[in-house]
Image (cartoon, rainbow, N blue to C red):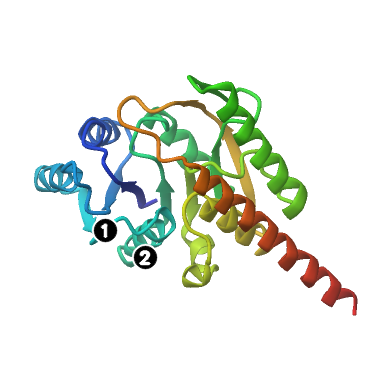
Amino acid sequence: MRTTIVIPTYNESENIEALIEEILALPISVHIIVVDDNSPDGTGEIADRLARRHQRVEVIHRPGKLGLGTAYIAGFKRALALGAELIVTMDADFSHQPAYLPQLVAKSEKSGLVIGSRYVEGGGIRYWSPVRRLLSWGGNTLARLVLGLWARDCTAGFRCYRREVLESIDLDSIFSDGYSFLIEVLYRCQRKGHRIAEVPIIFEDRRHGISKISRREVMKALYTILRLGLERASTAIRGKL
C-alpha cells in the first residue's frame, strides 16, 4: 500500500532531520510530507534541504502559525491527491517513535483508523509531570464519557488512516483546531462506522524544544468535547422523534 506520513512542524529544527532520516531507514516504503508553519528557527529550510536529498520527502510551506488542525488538513489533501492509500500522522519531536510505524501500517489492513495508544495494555508515558498526566487522563476520560468514544486514547496524534476514512469525512467542515482537532476527527470517524483499533506505544516527552501544549489548548479541547456532546445529544433526540 502507498503510505504517506504527514508531519506538522513549528520550530522543530533540532528534531526534524534526525526524525526523517530515521523514518526513511525503516523497512517500509513511505512518502513524507512536512507541513511547516513558517518556523522562525529554520525548520522549513532544513526540510527543504532534506527534500532535495530524498525524493520521498516534500514540504508544504504555510505563511504563519495557522494551527495544528489546518496543518493536518493540508497534509491530508496533498496525500490524497498523490494517491496515498494510508495516511499516517505523527509529531516531529520524537514523542512518537518511528519504530512503531510498521505496527501501525500492518494493523491498518483490517482497520480504518489505527491509533498509537498510550492507554492500552503495553502502552505508557515517560518523562511527564503528574499534572500533565492528570490532564491527559482527564481529557480522555471526559471525551469517552461525553462522546461515547471507544478508543482509550482519544487525543493521540500518532495515527494511521485508510484513504476511504478521510474521504468519508468533510475535512473542511471540521471546526476544531489544535489538539481538539484530533478528538473531533476521531468522533467523526466513529460516527461514520469505521473500524478503529489501537496499538500500544510508549510516548516519550520531546527530546528537544518546547512543548506546544498550553492552557488555551486545554480549554479548546474542553469546548470541543462539550460542543460535540451537544451535537450527539441533539442527533439522538431527533432520532427518537
- Pointer 1 local density, CA inside 10 Å: few below 14, some 14–19, many at least 20: few
Does residue 112 appear in the picture of this structure?
no
Is 89 left or right of 78, judged from the image as shown?
Answer: right
Q: Name the quadrant containing residue 226.
A: bottom right
Please report whichever mark, 1 or 2, sits nearer to the chain's N-terminal start.
1
Q: Residue at x 61, y 62 (%)?
A: 188
Q: Secondary structure at mark 2?
A: helix
Q: Amino acid at mark 1?
A: Gly
Q: Tell me the quarter of the picture where residue 115 sits.
A: top right
Residue 21 image point, x, y percent: 22, 33
> Comparing marks 1 and 2, which lies closer to the viewer?
1
Q: Amino acid at mark 2?
A: Lys
> Which structural element holds mark 1?
loop
- Residue 215 rendering spot, x and y as whole percentages: 52, 43
- Residue in the foreground of this view, choosing between 165 and 210: 210
State the count of labels. Answer: 2
- Camera sees residue 113: yes
| Side (left or right) of 102 relative to 197 | left
Q: Residue furthest top?
A: 127
CA gap, disc 1 and disc 2: 19 Å
Q: Quadrant of the C terminus?
A: bottom right
**25 vs 72, nearest the viewer:** 72
Q: Residues within 10 Å of mark 2 (few under 14, many from 20)?
A: some
Tell me residue 134's x, y (percent). 64, 30
The residue to which callout 2 is attached is 77
